[in-house]
């Protein structure tokens, strides 16, 4: 319940995606916390007809772009507020949305996917020892797992507290997140049977805040 309340609160604080990006596109993929920055949907290595799952799909902007590429798109999120926003914005995109916990969905689903991704989503806020085995079971052979999140703070690794602020007179809501350096993420994914693992920190764009974005990619 606390997790759901936290992400419903976050949904109210996070603005809707812009109508168009800098290139004038109505759908686009953004792995980083900065607009018009970094790689795009090509990281997933998919084509038309692929089946793609987003864990922690939020308001659905990235998933809608995947759908625009001709893929079958499934999104999972614990927040009803986030999902309602996704349904309202992307009603004609063909997104299949589920409310629930990412690991539970993966364990209960009978569907297999060509790609699974998470952008500052469930892959950051779920114990990898629980999530990664569940993802591998749902990935088709050779399928791609990709996720992005903020890099770890030096010396602060493993399970950390992440705070979502509320009103000034209320204590922040706390959710867990899992932070590791890139080399450790490579080791963790190898330990869970993934191959061709890469992990890197993409620097922030010039003139912006200096926090980069960790991007991890692997094959199942």
Image (cartoon, grey):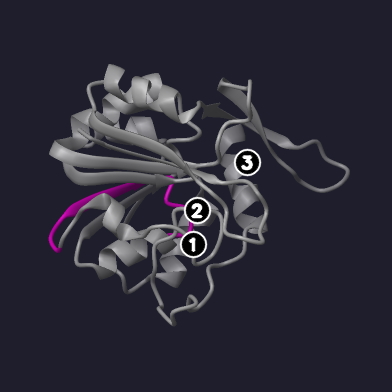
Q: CA distance from mark 3 to mark 1?
A: 27 Å
Mark 1 vs 2, N-terminal side: 2
Q: Quadrant of the N terminus?
A: top right
Residue 191 at x, y = what percent? 29, 17
| Eye-nearest disc, 3 or 1 | 1
- Nearer to me, 109 or 210: 210
Please, what secondary structure does the residue beneath circle 2 have? loop
User: Per the image, is 6 magenta?
Assistant: no
Mark 2 vs 3, N-terminal side: 3
- Nearer to me, 94 or 14: 14
- Nearer to me, 17 or 47: 47
- Asked whether the beta carbons under mark 1 and mark 2 sit within 8 Å of each other, the answer is yes
| Span shown in magenta | 48-60
Most common secondary structure along the magenta stretch: loop
Q: Quadrant of the C terminus?
A: top left
Mark 3 vs 1, N-terminal side: 3
Give the residue at mark 2. Answer: 32
Give the residue at mark 1. Answer: 37
Residue 176 at x, y = what percent? 58, 28
Residue 103 at x, y = what percent? 36, 30
Give the residue at mark 3. Answer: 6
Q: CA distance from mark 2 to mark 3?
A: 21 Å
Q: Is residue 82 visible?
A: yes
């Amino acid at each position: 319940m606390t997790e759901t309340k936290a992400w419903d609160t976050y949904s109210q604080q996070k603005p809707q995606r812009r109508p168009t990006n800098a290139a004038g596109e109505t759908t686009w993929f953004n792995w980083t916390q900065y607009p018009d920055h970094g790689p795009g949907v090509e990281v997933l290595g998919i084509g038309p007809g692929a089946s793609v799952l987003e864990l922690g799909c939020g308001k659905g902007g990235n998933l809608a772009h995947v759908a625009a590429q001709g893929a079958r798109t499934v999104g999972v999120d614990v927040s009803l507020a986030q999902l309602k926003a996704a349904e309202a914005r992307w009603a004609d995109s063909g997104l299949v949305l589920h409310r629930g916990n990412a690991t539970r969905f993966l364990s209960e689903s009978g569907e297999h996917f060509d790609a699974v991704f998470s952008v500052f989503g469930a892959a950051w806020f779920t114990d990898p020892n629980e999530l990664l085995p569940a993802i591998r079971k749902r990935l088709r052979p050779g399928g791609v797992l990709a996720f992005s999140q903020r890099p770890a703070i030096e010396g602060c690794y493993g399970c950390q507290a992440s705070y979502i602020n509320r009103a000034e007179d209320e204590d922040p809501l706390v959710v867990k997140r899992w932070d590791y350096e890139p080399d450790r993420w490579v080791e963790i994914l190898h330990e869970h049977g993934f191959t061709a693992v890469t992990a890197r920190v993409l620097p922030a764009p010039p003139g912006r805040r200096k926090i980069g974005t960790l991007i991890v990619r692997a094959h199942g």
